[in-house]
Amino acid sequence: MGTALMEWEYYLAEGLKKRFLERYEGKSLDEVFSGEEVGNCYLIEKKERIKIRFPETERAKWNLLSCLSLIPGIGPNREKKLKERGYSTLRDLVNHPRFKDDASRILKCLEERRIYEILEHMGRRFKKSHPLILQCAALHNLEKFLVLDIETLGLFNAPIILIGTGEFRQDELIIRQYFARNLEEEQAIILKFLELFRDKEALLTFNGRRFDVPFIQERLRYYGIEESLEIPNYDVFLFSRSLIRGVPNYRLQTLERYLLGFKRGEDVPSALIPDFYHYYLNTGNVALVIPIIKHNALDIVTTVKLFGMLLEMIKD
């Protein structure tokens, strides 16, 4: 994902390109990453020690059940009056003559763990960045999350060249990056992503609701693959805008610097990724795709760390 470079950024990027070429000249992907070929694409795998503390599941359920405003026709004032009359939770509303059907529907979704439907309903009642939606992350097992970040050759209708994923295993994050060594391998990296995706019940992304997921969905249609990516997507970008104040902007690297205290050194700008990749295709020199892969891995780690920070902010 990227934006157009300002003129001064372009000149800085040209210098960065030169340094990357000097640093990685003559290197192979295997020398730098020790990856392997899987399913007609290239897989890089690494582990990071990251601990994520979820809100208590029962507390999240209680907060959900206590939010009468989930029901159409109930706003803050009516919710207050209903609670004064003894309707404390959605369970109580199943006995209300007007609101019983909607309350029963939500309770059934919760009972059957149809979390996507609950989140879609909440998104119609509240902003998609509402803290209660973030609390619903606790309704999932952490190991059923899949972190997702992609690199592409453009903002629309362009090939995907790298799909980075993260999976939680106790206190470790397993990062798997599927890299297309040529454009013919794009379908292969998408298929490898789908293998992981089908076993998950929630995504963790940064701006993935607007970019990563729709982009992959479009490429699935391009290849004639009928697969829906409609599962809960906890988008760190949206929740950051809602919960965090005092930062210049909500770009990933800005949040990384201001909230995590980490400033990247020489990192390829997202807007230059197509240029770097095309250089590799034209020359066979992998020097400029190495920083793309490293950039993607950093994005995944930062997304996870910010997610953990946001969860800490709402746990009480």
Image (cartoon, helix red, strand yellow):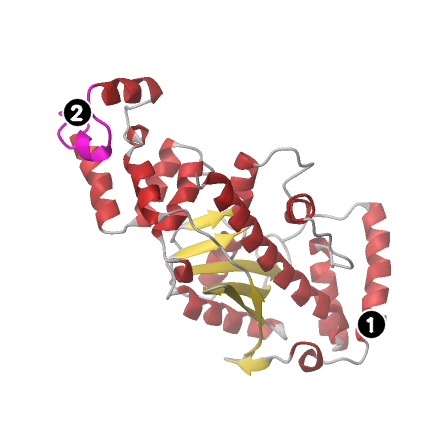
Quadrant (top left, top right, bottom left, bottom right) of the C terminus: top left
Task: Provide residue 179's location: percent of width, then percent of height.
Answer: 60, 71
| Chain part drawn in magenta | 85-99
Q: Position of residue 16 (x, y in %)?
A: 83, 60
Residue for badge 1: 23
Which residue is depicted at the point 53% across and 35% down? 242
Q: Nearer the viewer, residue 168 or 222?
A: 168
Q: Residue at x 57, y 49 (%)?
A: 306
Say what amino acid the circle numbered 2 marks: Arg
In the depicted structure, whether residue 37 falls above or below residue 208 = below
Label 1 Cα neighbours within 10 Å, binned few <14 / some 14-19 / many ≥20: few
State the count of labels: 2
* Mark 1 and mark 2 residues within 8 Å of each other at the beta carbon: no
Tell me the SS state at disc 1.
Answer: helix
Q: Amino acid at mark 1?
A: Arg
Question: Would you say 55 lies left or right of 30 here?
Answer: left
x 82%, y 52%: residue: 10
Residue 267's label in the rendered image is none
| 15 relative to 60 in the view: left or right | right
Q: Say which of 79 and 213 sits in front.
A: 79
Q: Which residue is mark 2?
A: 98
